[in-house]
Amino acid sequence: MKNKKVLYLTQAAMIAALYVVLTLLANALGLASGSIQVRFSEALTVLPFLTPAAIPGLFIGCLLANFVTGALLPDIIFGSLATLIGALGTWALGRLLVKRPEKKMLLTWLSPLPPIIANGLIIPPVLKYAYGVIPMWLSAVTVTAGEIISCGVFGLILLFSLKRYKNQLFPVD
């Protein structure tokens, strides 16, 4: 690649745009916000397993998506941070794969866990204090269930579909 920075920024921008579009689609179907959330865009949180460009792409995409869907400021801030934390965790698992290739299948299956855990812990208090959604334990269950569907099911389908094309989609040099 001639210019790695341009490629990185382009990939991040495309992931951010895709996150926003998929969130708007889920929002139109009534699935993107509230205590029960199944954001199709959250399936993209497995992409840091394949490329670090997904980290800023997901963060900016989530920030923009939360803003355009009318989320309150705490949700915009902490929801986006939850996605960032999840993306960093997924990226760390991908980096671990480089050091431990014999654990390839296990690490691939674990890749959705960081965003599931981050959102399951961070979003319920946001829903309680920003929107008055109670009880918080129920929000924790429903948000985590939505993340399991989005990241654990759709995300893994996406990851297994893209892994064979990793070098074509996300070239390193």
Image: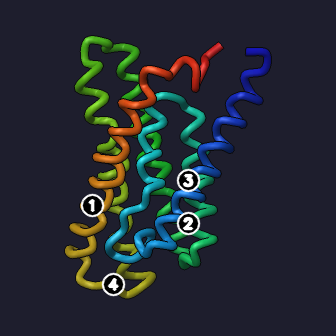
- Circles 4 and 2 in contact, beta carbons < 8 Å: no
Which of the 4 quarters of the picture holds residue 126?
bottom left
Which of the 4 quarters of the picture holds residue 21?
bottom right
Q: Which mark is residue 24?
A: 2
First-in-chain label (3 vs 2)? 3
The residue under label 1 is 144
Label 2: how many Cα within 10 Å (few below 14, some 14–19, many 20+): many
Q: Secondary structure at mark 1?
A: helix
Q: CA distance from mark 4 to mark 2?
A: 22 Å
Q: CA distance from mark 3 to mark 1?
A: 19 Å
Q: Secondary structure at mark 3?
A: helix
Residue positioned 33% across, 84% down in the render: 133
Q: Tell me the kind of residue under disc 2.
A: Leu
Q: Quadrant of the C terminus?
A: top right
Image height of 120 relative to 167, above or below: below
- Circles 3 and 1 in contact, beta carbons < 8 Å: no
* x and y, in percent, of residue 61 in the image: 60, 54
